[in-house]
Image (cartoon, rainbow, N blue to C red):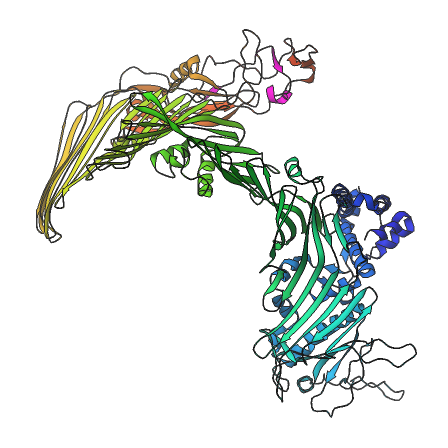
Amino acid sequence: MLAPLGSASTPAGAAGLLAALGRTGTDPAVTTELRRLARLSADLAALDDATLASWSGLAQLLQASRGVMSALRGLERVVADPQAAARLRGLGRELTELLLGLYLRAEHPRLLRAGDLLTLVDPAERATAVPVVDAGTVRLPWRRDVLRTDRIAGFLDDPLGTLEAAYLPGGLARAADTHRAAAELFAVVHELARALGLASAIGLWDPTAPPVPPAPPSDEVDIGETFPESRPPEPGTGDPEPPPPPPPPDLSAFQRRYFPQLTLALPGPAAAGGPPAAPRLSVAVLASSAEHPGGVRGLIVTLNSATSWSERRGDWAVGLTADGVLPAFVITADGLGLAPATGPVHGARAQLTLQRIAVAGTPAFRLGSATGTRLELGALTVAAVADLQLTRQSIEISADAADGALVLAGGDADGFVSSLLPAQGFRAAFDLGLIWSSRTGFRLRGGAGPEAYLPLGLSLGGVTLTDVRTGLRSSDGRLSVEVSAGLSASIGPVRIAVEGVGLAGRLTFPDDGGNLGIAELAADFQPPAGLGLAVTAPAVTGGGSFTSEPALGRYTGALHIKIADTIDIAAFGLLQTGSAGRHWSLLVILAGHLSPIELGWGFRLTGLGGLLALHRGMDTDALRDAAYGVRGSLDDLLFPDDPATRLPQLLSSVERFFPPAVDSHVAGPMAELEWGPKAEVNARIRLALLLQLNAQKVALYGTVRIGFPTLTRDSTLRIRAAVEAVADLRNRTARFSITLIEAKLFGTIQVSGGAAFFLRWGPGRVFAFTIGGFHPAFRPYIPAGLIEPARVTVHWNPISAVQIDLTQYFAISSTSMQFGAAAHAVVGCSWGRVTGDLAFNVLVMTSPSLHLEADLHVRVTVSVFGADLLSAGLDGSLSGPGPWSFSGTVSWRVWIFGISKSFHFEWGERGSIGATPQSAGQILGAEMAEPANWTPLRLRALPVKLRTGASALAPRDEVEVRQSKLPFGTRIETMEGNPLTDAGIWTLTTTSTGSITRLNDLTDVFPEQRFLAVPSKERPFRNGLVCGARLGRADWEVPAAAVAIDSTATDDLVIDGDTTVSGPVTLPPLTAAQTVSVALPALAPARAFTAGWSIREVA
């Protein structure tokens, strides 16, 4: 293919190559680059057969070809002049397509013409040569062969539909369309016939004309009868002017009368000096429309041949067998059918076969090394079968490689597979065939679709070759071919089964081309797609499987082993292999069940396990949701039942719990405990203690099941609960929660709800503890990171006519205490009932001043046949002090008559604005100057080794500054009732000369009566107000002069202590202006850090 580049080694040859693309001028840089490409192509051609016989040699060839093609496609980029580069835009792509077209025409003309027939190639002779205007320069007309890679996938998916759209426009309803389609189709088939050495003729057939002896077709195109040519007469010498041309003739009647006809013939062997022999086989094709005589819409095909014959032509053996005379058939848009006939029709079957004769003792084709893993194919056979019966009609075209073999040798495989293979390797013989049928489409021989399976059971040296699989797939413009085998072997008591090891090839058509010009070919040894293990030892039994999922880039598997009938071990996990832009990761969960080990007080240890997650984080929010029962369940993590059969579900859950995160690792043990008398189990507890190393985060998750009289017979008491506890040392928070997923007493009393505890120490200290949730008015101010648990609820149906529901909650936080309860009771039957409701809520705030809110709701309703007959209710609320306010509504209703009365009482004095003015700038400045309000956050382990007494921030560290006096970003008017001399909206910004930035705002809850003269009654507390900021920077640098290499055994890099690092600022600032400014602390003057860390990473 690259041979024409050899002519570009001289200036004249380069100019000639460019002239073939219509380019009359060039650039010296382009000519120089073409000469370099000519040398590279010569180096490719010089690769010897011994090198190309190995997989490494094939990879070397493809890599070198990729380099040449990449250089070709970027040919215009070697030009420095922008205007010249614009004129040469697309040169590399055009040259690549030209080389491919020349290669096909010179080396594989039959392939070119077959591709043209299948609509996969647009040949140059049918292209319109049009001058191309590029950047003001008019190029000469030029044409090229175009390989339509965009049509390959569509053709493989629906070949008949593709050909129908190209050659049967409109279903051949009109005669004019039929003539136009036949002119294109018959010309394409004629060129293919010439390339195959067949005789062909194109003409017109008149069904009304008397029959004449047919003349044998020749290599020349005979257009048959044509309509008279109409051209204006030549002007004479005495004529003053030529007559006007006649109007175009009406060809509709002509087109409806005549059928376009194509005749193909395989010439028979002729004796030397004798007359031409009769054709071995002839095919006549008529293109017919609904307007033609007979009204047949399609291609009518008639075959004439002797019943059986065979002969040898060069390296090919050609033959035909038939069980009768094939009837004429028609190819339509709807498929295949028999053509109309005037006499009786009998079905028949015929097969035309072409077989390439291979040299004895050698394969016709070999992919791979002669001594390594390789694919061998024997004699190639191409066959066409026409099965035309009265009840069914089909055409089948096949290509088979007989005497094929997949040879597995250990040299190309990984260490594990190599240890399984015998020294002489395996040779699995098979026949490979690709079939297309008008009824079933594409399939592989031996299979029902694009995959075929051949069971073998060949054993050698303790290893069994179980099967051979072949596959051909097309998706997203990509063709994949696979030939693989299954192996099984025994190593002591362990039986190992390997699936899918073999050879794989992929052909793609990227937009920017590949190592084959417009295509990219990859072929290599294919690692196992799956691995199975089975253990059958006297004391150990079990097994498992591991599967490769290339589309997801991972391996998954599960294993179950039983040891001495006392230890039951189950494990499952996944390995993410990693790809471009994604790091590898590993997740393994191990759970083992033991014979009970007594621990005392009725507890027994019945299980041990563990979790290891490399390059994965821990999503404590997802684990919390699973513990609460909001999404998922902790049962998928803690000793799951039957992980082998539930593997996809389990992996989906644990991947959500532990998402990929580079340089993050999670590990921890798991345990299962049981409690109860020796002969019975009343409780089962499963726990996992997990540590996320880089995030300084420790978490405990557990499930609890309790049952009386036993865990499995729980008619008296049944409890299912989940526990969560998380300590985040970096963010200085801790939380604990317990959720009742299910609780039932005596089978009739149901209990649900939960409890939670949250603590944040350091700046912005917060704590909260609740059983059953919070007061409704407090929900906007629940600390971030704490999810409100469900109300503690008791549901009881003592008898069918009585239903009682009780709910309650209690909560205490750093600034409040709150509690409440509700009762709902229903007594009645189908025709009438009495409903009662009682509820109250109390909220007491202790800071910044005492505040109480309480409400009460009481209602009783009597209903008859679904309608309320009598009801009475009371709704009231109390709030205060400053002042105290009590309001409410009393209502009652009898049938459709109702009365309600509202009331409101207020006593005490309102708070008033104090007489001592204060300054917001002084208040905020004092808070900013307080060192306790500045907190450094270490996002990962410190990558430096600090000298004694030194303190510094790592470049990825962050700093939080927060205060709780006054909010930023909203209008402030007072401070605890005292007016402000500088009231207004205050903001928080950074003023450092370096690149210190505010990463995000910090928020908190502020009481409105602290900073507003007239606070709102509807929301005495406002959440989400800015109280500070999180700061950091990303461009830390160290001057090169500050770095020295310490040659001592510690191999440390040292920053000189006398060098000043730019950008230090004072912390904290001493004053605050109208805009409060903050800054990072200065770096330490000297420190050392271990080798292996980038200077920019640790500065």
State yes or no: residue 1079 in magenta: yes
Where is residue 1079? Give x, y as percent.
51, 18
Q: Residue at position x 63%, y 87% from top? A: 293
Where is residue 186? Give x, y as percent.
73, 74
Where is residue 342? Give x, y as percent.
62, 89
| Residue sitting farthest toward the front | 538
The residue lying toward the viewer, choosing from 482 and 538, is: 538
Above or below, 262 against 441 in this view is below
Q: Residue at position x 57%, y 73% from top? A: 334
The residue lying toward the viewer, choosing from 384 and 258, is: 384
| 900 sits to left or right of 380 | left
Above or below, 799 against 203 in this view is above
Q: Which residues are magenta?
A: 1073-1099
| 542 sits to left or right of 813 | right
Above or below, 929 against 61 in this view is above
The residue lying toward the viewer, choosing from 340 and 992, is: 340
